Image (cartoon, rainbow, N blue to C red):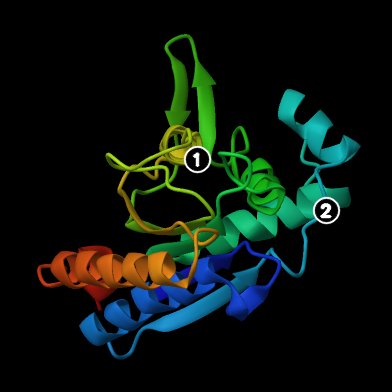
Amino acid sequence: MKILRLSCSPPGHASESNRLAQRVIEFLQRADPAAVVIDRDVGRVVLPPIDASYAVSQRSSADLSEDGTAALSAALIDELQSADIVVIGTPMHNYTVPATLKVWIDHIARVRYTFDVSPRGKIPRLRDRPVFVAVSSAGRFFGPRARQPDFLTPYLRAILGMIGLADLTFFSVEGTGLGEDVVAASRTEADRALTEYFSTFRVPSAASAP
């Protein structure tokens, strides 16, 4: 099993979202001790935004894969396609995804590569696979104690679903700006949710095939 871990927080491994993503990885490695983890840290090694060559390639069938960020886009798409499972560790910034994650999405959501356009709308091209999203937020965005909007989870469901990744599961540590007691309680709740989920988890068939 190959796991692509996408880390989106500037503090790196010290961040709450990366800590939670690591917990997800640990549960996955229990399910498959031979699992290989491929790390893509876009939080500290920020990807360049798409450039003119990429933009032109969106409107043309010409092969511009060797020009500018179009080449990087192709490499990121290959990396994603090769993964059996994706783990995204991300903070919530201003109610939605951080800019670092949005740039990665701009690279991998690419017409004729990961989706097609038809009279019926956009058609996914990627094989579905489990995507686990580990979210940290300074406030609360889920449940009866939520005090802020959440544009992160519906956006990720929509944009990743557009390219074929519909099997999304979210875990969160919320209230990181509300004091140590709140963070500790949120971590405990996240661990409880992880334990419950992975008690019935099975390695995807595509990953377990010889």
| Residue at x-position 52% and y-position 28% | 116
**How far, Cα to Cα, is label 1 from label 2?**
22 Å
> Does 27 sit left or right of 49 as displayed?
left
Residue at x-position 28% and y-position 79%: 27
The quarter of the rendered structure image containing the N terminus is: bottom left
Q: Which residue is mark 1?
A: 152
Could you say where residue 71 lies in the image, as x and y percent from the top left?
78, 54
Q: Nearer the viewer, residue 181 or 28?
A: 181
Q: Secondary structure at mark 2?
A: loop
Q: Categorize mark 1 by other alpha carbons within 10 Å: few (<14), some (14-19), many (20+).
A: some
Residue 114 vertical placement versus 6 (above, below): above
**Residue at the image position 46 percent from the left and 57 percent from the top:** 175
What residue is shown at x 22% (from left), y 64% (from top)? 193
In the image, 120 versus 150, the foreground residue is: 150
On residue 107, the disc is none
Q: Amino acid at mark 2?
A: Pro
As shown in the figure, which amino acid type bears the numbered disc 1? Leu
Q: Which mark is residue 48?
A: 2
Front of the two marks 1 and 2:
1
Instruction: Kindly indicate the quadrant of the structure image that contains residue 146.
Output: top left
Residue 51 seen in render? yes
Q: Where is residue 153? Give x, y as percent.
A: 43, 41
* Quadrant containing the C terminus in the rendered view: bottom left
**Label 1 close to label 2 by CB (< 8 Å):** no
**Residue 67 appears in view:** no
For label 2, count other residues whose C-alpha is less than 10 Å away and answer few (under 14), some (14-19) or many (20+): few
Q: Reading the chain from its start, which is encountered first: label 1 or label 2? A: 2
Q: Please state which of residues 92 and 71 is positioned toward the viewer in this rendering.
A: 92
- Residue 206 % position (x, y): 27, 65
